[in-house]
Amino acid sequence: MSSRPIALVTGASAGIGREIARILAVDHDLILTARRESELRFLAAELTSATCHVFPADLADPTAPHKLFEAVTAAGLHIDVLVNNAGFGDLGPFAEADLGKMLRMIQVNVMALTELTGLFLPGLRAKGRGRILNVGSVAGFQPGPFMAVYYATKAFVNSFSEALSNELGGSGVTVTCLCPGPTLSEFATVAGVQNLTQFKASSAAETRPVAEAGVRAMRRGKRLIITGFRNKLMIFAERFVPRGMVIRAVRSLQDKRRGAKE
């Protein structure tokens, strides 16, 4: 049995999750989970420096988080790092949305993240050490008309992560929330915004530096990391702007996105 620490990464088949797995593989063994088993096995074959355990799971299934926990436990694996990265979004008015898709979004972005944290946290606390990295978003700092459910789920992730970080102070377990802005990943394709200016290569961040910033902050035990100078400036400026004005500004941005999409 390897003596290296073990990191579990959800949504490891693409995007930020895949890059986080690549970074952690230098000094961690990995538990890789996502819907697409073939992509996970391809990544596992690439990461020759680590022992990789592949556990395919669709976290949109309400039974999946507990089944994943049971499978990891049955394999005799005890994690040191939990990376809750899995998530997706969608663009359009809520009144016209596929309600089933919205509920699956809440299941993946909120329920699965919360359940996995609750299931694995006791083991980390018992060891008196461990790290949790939750992938939130700059979208979580304000309401988002036309991406109402996505923005709301990320508001939960941001708030939950910061509160849990405070609760666990002195326990040896740290919680870090990574809040990227638009990033070049499969998220844009799933959400239907891949052709928008904010998600073009000239505007969106590369996944690697975002993942590096998240892992670096996690290793340091930081509570919150917002990537990108413009994103940091935007979040700072929102403190001094009336809430209604912020919502109207987001609405204007989303109107432009919808126009570009249509």
Image: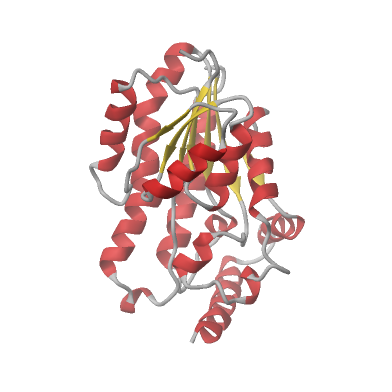
Left or right, residue 61 beside residue 208 = left
Q: Is residue 62 visible?
A: yes
Viewed as shown, does residue 193 lie left or right of 198? left
The residue furthest left is 63
- Relative to 163, say whether 79 is above or below: above
User: Which residue is at 34% across, 27% downward?
Assistant: 72
Q: What percent of the width, then of the height, locates residue 71?
A: 29, 29
Quarter of the image where the N terminus is located: top left
Q: Is residue 183 left or right of residue 60?
A: right
Residue nearest the viewer, comparing 249 with 17: 17
Would you say 104 lies left or right of 131 here? Answer: left
Residue drawn 53% across and 45% down? 17
Comparing 197 with 146, the one in front is: 197
Residue at image x 32%, y 44%?
57
Q: How far from the left and from the top, in percent, is residue 177?
A: 57, 41
Image spot of residue 37 (x, y percent)? 37, 46
Residue 166: image quadrant is top right
Q: Position of residue 42 (x, y in %)?
A: 48, 45
Does 51 sit above or below residue 76?
Answer: below
> Is residue 56 depicted above or below 48 in this figure?
below
Q: Is residue 161 visible?
A: no
Near-viewer residue (94 or 59): 59
